[in-house]
Amino acid sequence: MLHIPANTKLLAVIGAPISHSLSPIMHNAAIAHLGLDYTYLPLEVEIQNLASAVEGLATIKNFVGFNLTIPHKQEIMPLLREISTIAQTVGAVNTVKRTEKGWIGTNTDVAGFLAPLPKLNRDWQKTAVLILGNGGAARAVVVGCLELGCPMIHVVGRDQTKLQQFQQQVNAQMRGYNLRVHPWASLDTLLEFAGLVVNTTPLGMGKDVLGSPLTSSQIAKLPPQAIVYDLIYNPRQTKLLQLAKEQGLAEINGLEMLLHQGALALEFWLDIPAPIKIMQLALENALTRA
Ligand code: NAP
């Protein structure tokens, strides 16, 4: 029988929906490996209840910190005492911990996004980026590409109003940065210049598992050295990545991003190195079972 003593420290991921999240599997594997008296829980909280949930968690003395996923990464920000510079730049928080001052937040998605890129050995300062979608993850990708030194970012979205807001927010945080937004209909004109294509839409997972944001003939227009990066990690090979592979392009899925943002979150809470191999194995086993 599972026994959780009263002094067990608690961590969690807060989202709605939450059942798809692999974070509890990844973090509980790390905690068990480290022999710590912690438990990591999935908490389903609707957007309108986030403030009261976070207020309630503050009253639970053994609650140490939490991750945030859809749709809370921006809504959490006014509820925090302090926000790291990187999270302010992204405009989103995915990791929060308790301190004597109150809740403080950071963003580990940017570092997670960047994690698989160095091994590709590209000249990022000459790489134009094409981001498909303009939601929360796209903001972290923009900040990551800024860190890489990419000279130009094109963002394609389906809602003109949201695209304009996206551009305004990015301009406010990253003045002078070379970012342009485009309607989905302009996609074909952007492909031949893209050195890195990043899918930040859910096309390729869940109910859209058979979907792809690019067709085979669109992928054929990409330069031969282009990298196709899909933030989706389940399935590991999305339709987009399958098409990219067929064209001989380099492809990356979202598993390493998930792993590294999780490892950095654990280090933020515990101040000790995360057992990254154990976390990776737990994720791979979970995906094999799925
Ligand atoms: P989000 O804020 O909801 O943004 C999703 C974006 O995709 C929005 O711009 C949305 O457009 C667009 N979109 C949705 N359905 C579309 C469709 N059928 N056609 C074209 N565009 C569509 O979500 P998010 O937090 O950015 O997450 C996006 C994806 O990244 C998800 O698949 C998530 O699992 C993945 N992700 C992975 C990691 C990781 O660690 N690997 C981390 C974060 C996110 P509208 O605004 O017009 O609806």
Image (cartoon, helix red, strand yellow):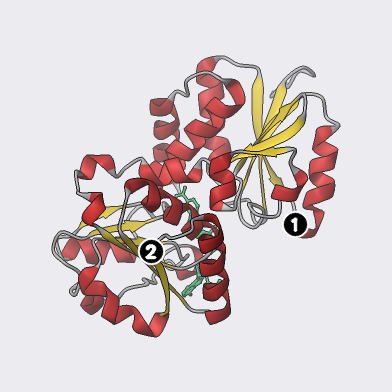
Mark 1, secondary structure of its residue: loop
Residue 286 visible here: no
Q: Quadrant of residue 63?
A: top right
Residue at x-position 59% and y-position 53%? 91
Q: Nearer the viewer, residue 152 or 246?
A: 152
Q: CA distance from mark 1 to mark 2?
A: 36 Å
- Asked whether, in this view, residue 282 is left or right of residue 73, the answer is left
In the rendered view, tell whether residue 178 sits above or below residue 19.
below
Residue 11 visible here: yes
In the rendered view, tell whether residue 258 sits above or below residue 248.
above
Q: Nearer the viewer, residue 242 or 192?
A: 192
Residue at x-position 80% and y-position 19%? 6
- Asked whether, in this view, residue 274 is left or right of residue 76, the answer is left
Residue at x-position 69% and y-position 24%? 2
Mark 2, secondary structure of its residue: loop
In the rendered view, tell whether residue 20 sits above or below residue 184.
above
Instruction: Note whether ligand 1 is within 8 Å of mark 1.
Output: no
The crowding category of the residue bearing disc 2, from other C-alpha atoms within 10 Å (few below 14, some 14 to 19, many at least 20), is: few
Residue that carries the numbered disc 1 in the rendered image: 46
Q: Nearer the viewer, residue 20 or 166?
A: 166
Residue 164 is situated, as x and y percent measured from the top left of the image, at 54, 75
Q: Quadrant of the N terminus?
A: top right
Residue at the far bottom: name it: 185
Q: Amino acid at mark 2?
A: Asn
Residue 89 is situated, as x and y percent measured from the top left of the image, at 54, 49
Among the two numbered marks 1 and 2 on one chain, the one whose residue lies closer to the N terminus:
1
Residue 261 is situated, as x and y percent measured from the top left of the image, at 48, 39
Q: Quadrant of residue 87?
A: top right
Q: Amino acid at mark 1?
A: Glu
Q: Which mark is residue 178?
A: 2
Residue 126 is situated, as x and y percent measured from the top left of the image, at 22, 56
